[in-house]
Image (cartoon, rainbow, N blue to C red):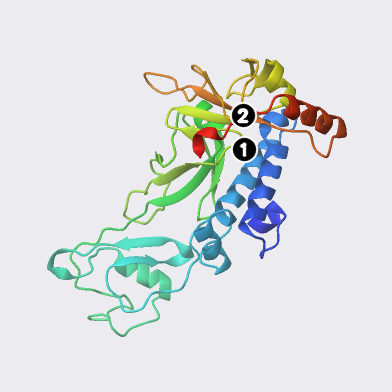
Amino acid sequence: MRDPYEVLGVQRSASAAAIKSAYRKLAKKHHPDNNKNDPKAAARFAEINSANEIVGDEDKRRQFDRGEIDAEGKPRFQGFPGGGGAGARSGPGGFEYSFRTGPGGGAAGGSFEDILNSMFGNASRAGARGARSGQFEFDTGGVGLDLDLSVAMTVTLEESVNGGEKRVRLPTGRELNVKIPAGVTAGQQIRLKGQGETAAGHPPGDLLITVSITPHPYFKVDGNDLRIDLPITLYEAVLGGKVRVPTLGSAVELSIPKNTSSGRTFRLKGKGLPKAGATGDLYVTTRIMLPDGNDAELEALMQKWRDGHPYNPRNDIG
């Protein structure tokens, strides 16, 4: 993936507010719903969301700036840790191996020698018991070799609801298409059997894909429900009318009663997230938006109305 700052079109010194503003503009511009005839829109939208996940998060942004994670949020190789002991070690090709301590307190295992020999080309003779035939030998008690691979996958809210297919790049450089099950939730893990690392004498590991859902430019998820702030005009609020409201399916019309205040919430039943048992609702909160710029005619009308119909909506709050 490209540099997240480059994707969002901001400088590395940009403020959090500037990054948030850039993300919202790009997400709105490239959202697949607004570019239904552009087959590349979904890929651009996903790239924008992935970039925002890095630089839009304070902790991840600092980690990326320090070079601790890459543009996909994956840890960068920092070299071999000192001091020995059990734990994760990076082996040939950047693969990560986990070693578990076996009976007797030793670092266990059958294929540990193979890993060291492949790493050092059988060149070393010192430090291993016996040092016969150019092979490392250890008094070990049965090591487990962790061949599972873990990757993160970001999906849109629409993809999480409807399912689909997404291409995932593995740490090994291999790419494969992954089927996204309909109804997948944030934090859920997809396991693909036998798609992990391989090693002689061991069954192949699995691929573990942890799903995250990118923030939606319009909807906020609240359990099974969705929430949206809907801009309405001043005359729609005063006179009432019908306005179109986006949903995860097709847009619907909502009747706005006369004299609707900003902040009033309407419920659209069954327009939330589909879940086993019951589908959530969509809660629509009105936000009155005035026209851009100064409007002398509107100001004159409001001054006349104020003088003839004064009222104070803040009486109850002191």
Task: State the image coordinates of residue 249 (x, y, percent, origin top left).
Answer: 59, 21
Count the marks.
2
Between 314 and 58, the one lying in front of the other is 314
Q: Which residue sits at x=12%, y=68%? A: 104
Left or right: where 163 falls relative to 4: left
Between 135 and 27, the one lying in front of the other is 27
Q: Amino acid at mark 1?
A: Pro
Question: Compared with residue 269, is residue 24 higher up or lower down, i.e. above or below?
Answer: below
Q: Amino acid at mark 2?
A: Ser
Task: State the residue lying farthest toward the bottom.
Answer: 126
Q: Which residue sits at x=23%, y=73%? A: 138
Q: Which residue sits at x=55%, y=50%? A: 53
> Disc 1 on helix, strand or loop?
loop
Q: Which residue sits at x=64%, y=60%? A: 15
Task: State the image coordinates of residue 40 (x, y, percent, origin top left).
Answer: 71, 37
Callout 2 environment at 10 Å: few (<14), some (14 to 19), or many (20+)?
some
Question: Compared with residue 109, is residue 245 higher up or lower down, i.e. above or below?
Answer: above
> Disc 2 on helix, strand or loop?
loop
| Mark drawn on residue 262 | 2
Left or right: where 92 falls relative to 243: left
Judging by the rendered image, the residue that carries numbered circle 1 is: 217
Whichever of labels 2 and 1 marks the residue nearer the N terminus, that label is 1
Task: State the image coordinates of residue 106 (x, y, percent, origin top left).
Answer: 19, 70
Question: Compared with residue 176, is residue 252 higher up or lower down, i.e. above or below?
Answer: above
Question: Compared with residue 76, is residue 129 higher up or lower down, i.e. above or below?
Answer: below
Task: State the residue lying farthest toward the left.
Answer: 104
Q: CA distance from mark 2 to mark 1?
A: 20 Å
- Quarter of the image for residue 301 reads top right
Residue 163 appears anywhere in the view: no
